[in-house]
Amino acid sequence: MPYQITDCRTLTTTQLCGAMNEAFADYVVPLSMSEQSFKDFQIQRGFSADHSFVATREGKVVSFWFSSLPNLEYEDRAYTLSVGTHPGHRRKGLSRKLLEAVIEKQRQSTCSGLQLEVVSTNTKAVTAYETFGFQCARKLRVCKLSNGFRSAGDLEGIDFKRIALTELPKNEADFFDTVPTPQNSRNAMTGLVAKTQVVVAIKGRDLLGWGAVYDDGVVAQIAVQRAFRGNGIGRGILNQLASLVEAEHLTFVNVDVTTPSINGFLDRAGAEDILQQFEMRLAI
């Protein structure tokens, strides 16, 4: 029986989550995602059923390309949440067919291209994406910090408090030196607002910086206004974030390795590298 290529509008969470778990079951660390975790994954990364496609055979999802809508924050590129194929159906050209379907759909809107992340040591996947026309745009670091006490230095006159996500400034230009990847964006945190906690550092009426952490200990954002860096404010924010979660480590996912400010800060704090990823982009 031939494979059928369809979008995801009629498929259930159970079907899509099961397909993802099966596709990554033979990895070094097999994926075992609950349906709730999969729903969070979809929300955080902007899943669009209209723009995501699967290959089915005899009614079973055997390959998928999950995509978001085009995002203005990323120059109208659409984000690829995940791509995978059941081990028994690989090397049959399914990913290419799914990519073609995704591109055809995205071209009906304002989409300028696609972007995704791939583990740098996964040479087969990197090569496959390069064959599809993707190019490496930046290298990203994934690291962790032990969730223990960290000296923050002299922070006299600086107050730390929790706030609602909606209270953060819309203009982030004075705080960020690089653009967060989609799963760490403001939209991602808004989607998971019930599982996101935000702490700000304030002196008088001045907002000096903030940090945001998901319930699992993944730090979505940490930012200090340029004029106030080097004074222990970032460490102070880390201390506050660490106190809000029960995770053994604070994890930083997809830190741009070419940004000295955040990498220097993490190194001084004792960050331990886990892996590196490539952010790859395809113009359409």
Image: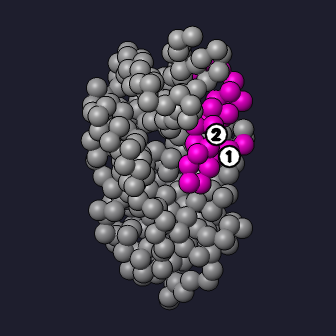
Can residue 83 be seen in the rendering of this structure?
Answer: yes
Q: Is residue 120 left or right of residue 3?
A: left
Q: Position of residue 20 (x, y in %)?
A: 60, 36
Colour scheme in use: one colour
Whether residues under marks 1 and 2 lie with C-beta atoms below 8 angstroms apart, the answer is yes
What range is drawn magenta here? 7-34
Instruction: State yes or no: residue 49 in magenta.
Output: no
Q: Position of residue 21 (x, y in %)?
A: 64, 39
For the residues marked 1 and 2, what is the alpha-carbon distance in whole angstroms? 6 Å
- Near-viewer residue (22 or 268): 22
Q: Quadrant of the N terminus?
A: top right
The residue positioned 68% from the left and 46% from the top of the image is 32
The residue positioned 31% from the left and 31% from the top of the image is 132
Can residue 102 be seen in the rendering of this structure?
Answer: no
- Residue at disc 1, secondary structure: loop
Q: Which residue, given by chain and number where applicable, does mark 2 sit on?
A: 21
Bin the neighbour count of mark 1 within 10 Å (Cα to Cα): few under 14, some 14-19, many 20 and up: some
Q: Quadrant of the C terminus?
A: top left
* Residue furthest to the bottom: 154
- Near-viewer residue (65 or 77): 65
The residue positioned 67% from the left and 57% from the top of the image is 215
Q: Position of residue 62 (x, y in %)?
A: 58, 26
The three-letter code of the residue at mark 1 reads: Ser
- Residue at disc 2, secondary structure: helix
- Near-viewer residue (164 or 139): 139
Q: Which residue, given by chain and number where applicable, does mark 1 sit on?
A: 32
The three-letter code of the residue at mark 2 reads: Asn
Of marks 1 and 2, which one's residue comes earlier in the chain? Answer: 2
In this view, 263 is above or below 187: below
Q: Is residue 44 left or right of residue 114?
A: right
